[in-house]
Amino acid sequence: MSLEQILQHRRAIRYYDAQQPISADRVEDCLKLATLAPTSSNMQLWHAHHITDPAVIQQLVPACLGQTTVSTAQQLVVFTVEPSLYKERCQQNIDFQRENIKRTYPQAKWEKYTALQTSYYTKVIPFLYSRFFGLWGGVRKVISTFAGWFRPIPRQMTEGAMDTVLHKSCALVAQTFMLAMSEAGYDTCPIEGFDAHRVKRILGLPCSSEVSLIVSCGIRQPSRPLGDRFRVDFSSQYHRIGE
């Protein structure tokens, strides 16, 4: 399918066809494609919990407020953000960039670019992602507000703001996954109506994990009419600045 066909095919499906199973391996392949989605500072602080066990899916139905998109789903993917992994991801980025810089740039640039990458992942990222019951985020906010009087600087530095950054990155991953599923001829529905505490308890997730989005998977039930999409007029959302 072309990109336009993929986008037209993707709909938020509420009822899946129980007679049409989908391949768990194909869904996993779509999740592998989703790893190509961009994330802030390439930190990739997300996990995908791919649920293929019908019994676990049924356990999750009440935690997802009894929604039919879950109760009729063939499979589920629970996307979580993992802020506690930031130190590990920093080191992985540094290790990768040390070799990547040698492959990409002339030798005269190696030392400079390696130093820049190392400084970013050993100083800037730990400064932004470290937590202490919300207090350290408040300190960052004060520092950014003061520094912003003299030069442009990112202002979203509280722990809540950094949480938003993680969830935005995870949403890009989830959207990429859903488009890959459409290209495979499968259907999905992104779900935000759930009890995150109960979902984590059912799946045995650690306290540090944050449930970002649940995506139900299957093939749409043909007897259920979808109707037309509602979208507000494009002119009310589109603002061109310049010629």
Image: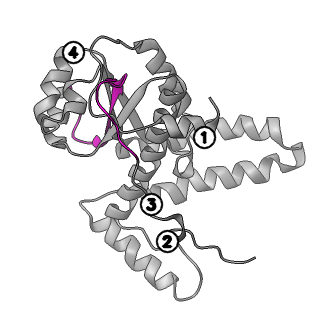
Instruction: Give whichever of discs 4 and 2 has the lower sequence position.
Output: 4
Tell me the distance, in whole angstroms, between the alpha carbons under discs 4 and 1: 33 Å
Whichever of callouts 4 and 3 sits on the residue coming sooner in the sequence is 4
* Residue toward you, 194 or 187: 187
Q: CA distance from mark 2 to mark 3?
A: 35 Å
User: CB of mark 4 within 8 Å of CB of mark 2?
Assistant: no
Residue 4 image label: 1
Q: Which residue is mark 2?
A: 236
What range is drawn magenta here? 203-228
Sequence-wise, the earlier of marks 2 and 3 is 3
Q: Is residue 148 above or below residue 5?
A: below
Mark 4 touches mark 3? (CB < 8 Å): no
- Reading the image, the residue beneath label 4 is 54
Label drawn at residue 128: 3
Image quadrant in which the C terminus is located: bottom right
| CA–CA distance in space, label 3 to label 1 | 38 Å
Measure the alpha-carbon separation of dots 4 and 2.
43 Å
Disc 1/disc 2 C-alpha distance (Å): 22 Å
Confirm whether residue 128 shows in the render.
yes
Which numbered disc, 4 or 2, marks the residue closer to the eye?
A: 2
Q: Is residue 77 left or right of residue 114?
A: left
